[in-house]
Image (spheres, rainbow, N blue to C red):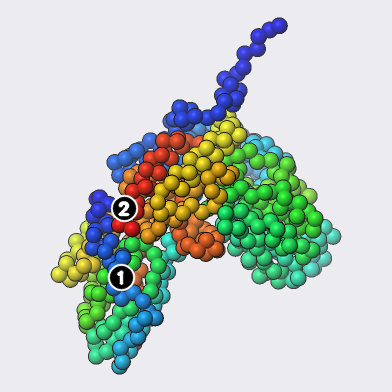
Amino acid sequence: MTAVSTPASLQRSMHAMDNAEVLRIRNDFPVLDQLVNGKPLIYLDSGATSQNPLSVIEAEQEYYEQRNAAVHRGAHHLAVEATEVFEDARQTVADFIGAQYEETVWTSNATEGLNLISYALSNAALWAAQGRGGSALKELAIGPGDEIVVTEMEHHANLIPWQELAFRTGATLRYIPIADDGSLRLEAAAEIVGDRTKLLAFSHASNVLGTINPVAQLVSMARRVGALVVLDACQSVPHMAVDVKGLDVDFAVFSGHKMLAPTGVGVLYGKQDLLDVLPPFLTGGSMITTVTMERAEYLPAPQRFEAGTQRISQAVALATAVNYLTETGMDRIHAWESTLGQRLVKGLEGIDGIRVVGPASGTERIGLAAFDVAGVHAHDVGQFLDDRGIAVRVGHHCAQPLHRRLGLTATTRASTYLYNTTDDVDAFLDAVSGVRAYFQA
Amino acid sequence: MSLDQLYQQIILDHSKQRHGSGLAETDAPDGTSTGQSHQLNPVCGDEVTLRLAVSEGTVRQISWDGAGCSISMASASVLSELGEGMSVEELHSVIDNFREVLRSRGKVQADPEILGDAAAFEGVARYAARVKCAMISWVAAEDALNQATA
């Protein structure tokens, strides 16, 4: 028998992350190595936007230094190289979420992806009404009497596009309420998702509550009535292994900047049979087959939804970010952040006058926690923490209806990522424990 | 710039003991003409509704309702206390002065002779993200003043 040595990368993937590894990871992130107000920066705002490792920053720079050209056109060397890295990036991201290459569409961010679906669907109604696009479109067309269902915990990006789709098509918007513990009321969902439901849109994980929603149960409710499922994966894809095929959703969206990549690039996943029949959202160059002065024929997905010159360097950088995450291991990252999330909640629960929103400690949540401090406005909490070099988000986190439901106008949110240690969490908790005394609350 | 210079005791006090707070509890004095303005900062959700009553060229009453951070609430309270009894012209000029100080990024010093307790907000000018918090009730007052004297 020959002794087989385990490669270092595999060895690393077998054991859990710890503070020592996180400190090594942190060295890859130049922006984290700085003082804020004379104190070492503790970055706990990755739920809003994450930081970039050097490899991602260099990938974007290298693209501009060596390959920059317009993709999918021109026969010259640079154009060929640019197209190659751009499309390789698409394959990398597709593999990361278990999608096919053709099902992976570049967008500016998740918000644009959700608007793309919303407009493609109302365009479907317009097309179908005029006999354009074949019989498949008729089934997708949404109109008066139909219902679009969202949840009470949605980010505005996964709410307003559906409000506007309902307005454009005459459909009715309904929502699944939440329970006081921040979970969806599934018994209510089972009543709301019915024969009239054409589309069910919900977040995989809440950006405020930290709740991880039961995708399988919600998908099966939608399947029973033949409704489309749209998954907002902004707070899941960066933090845990997500397999869109396994989840069996029809569409999923996420943003690059929340997963170690630059701003300006996001991804829309859609099942191929849907993407190939849906009308485009934006039209113009690079997405057509034949154009006359009167009309145009469109390419299949993904180009069908990528009008105009694309965000090439950002796509390349996003693929580099995906490689960074994959090498660290999504399951390991998820486990580490779960530990941090539990430590956050448990610590906050132990501080007088703090009310954590979402699941209590001991219940599954992603690595973030939002909370109210009795007698102190979130904006003041954020200022107090900033003075200690701690970056958090304050406000309604683009979820006003959810905050209204919680009886709050604003909360403070600490959100972690793979570069945060338990010491970061402890320093944050220590600072929070001094907030009420400082403000004499 | 330390946090204590931002959150001066006078600001913390006013954020809790809010002068002029409670629109429903106060009626505008008889014989005054009133203006009312609602201002919202969508970034943080700070909200102020302010009513101002004027007669014979003098500001008789400034009442308000609001929800928001300590800076925004204290600022409304100080404004209400400071502005009552001023002439319309005086209040306009004090609002202009306050705005100039707040938008100066710390370059223009607050003169307590002009601004009274509102000079305590000088430190806010160094925190760009908080200037709107301090300004919101003053913007409402300016709007209400214009309505009351239109």
Q: Are marks 1 and 2 on the same chain?
A: no
1 and 2 marks in contact (CB < 8 Å): no
Q: Name the residue located 80 percent from the left edge and 55 percent from the top edge.
A: A224
Pick the residue in front: A110 or B35: B35
Decide: is A16 above or below A206: above
Q: Name the residue located 61 percent from the left edge and 53 percent from the top edge.
A: A183
Of the two numbered discs 1 and 2 in the rendering, the one whose residue sits closer to the viewer: 2
Q: Chain of mark 2?
A: A
Q: Residue B18's mark?
A: 1
Residue A347 visible, this orientation? yes
Q: Residue A83's mark?
A: none
Q: Few, some or many C-alpha atoms within 10 Å of disc 1 (few <14, some 14-19, many ≥20)?
A: some
Q: What is the x, y in percent for residue A149?
A: 68, 61
Q: What is the x, y in percent for residue A90?
A: 65, 40
Which quadrant of the structure image shows residue B52? bottom left
Decide: is B101 above or below A327: below
Q: Secondary structure at mark 2?
A: helix
Q: Amino acid at mark 1?
A: Arg
For the C terminus of chain A, the image quarter is bottom left
Looking at the image, the residue that sits furthest to the left is B113
Pick the residue in front: B28 or A43: B28
Q: What is the x, y in percent for residue A266?
A: 59, 47
Q: Amino acid at mark 2?
A: Ala
Looking at the image, residue A358 sits to the left or right of residue B101; the answer is right
Residue A133 visible, this orientation? no
Tell me the residue that label 2 is attached to: A437
Q: Name the residue located 65 percent from the left edge and 9 percent from the top edge.
A: A3
Marks 1 and 2, how far apart at CA: 20 Å
Q: Few, some or many C-alpha atoms within 10 Å of disc 2 (few <14, some 14-19, many ≥20)?
A: few
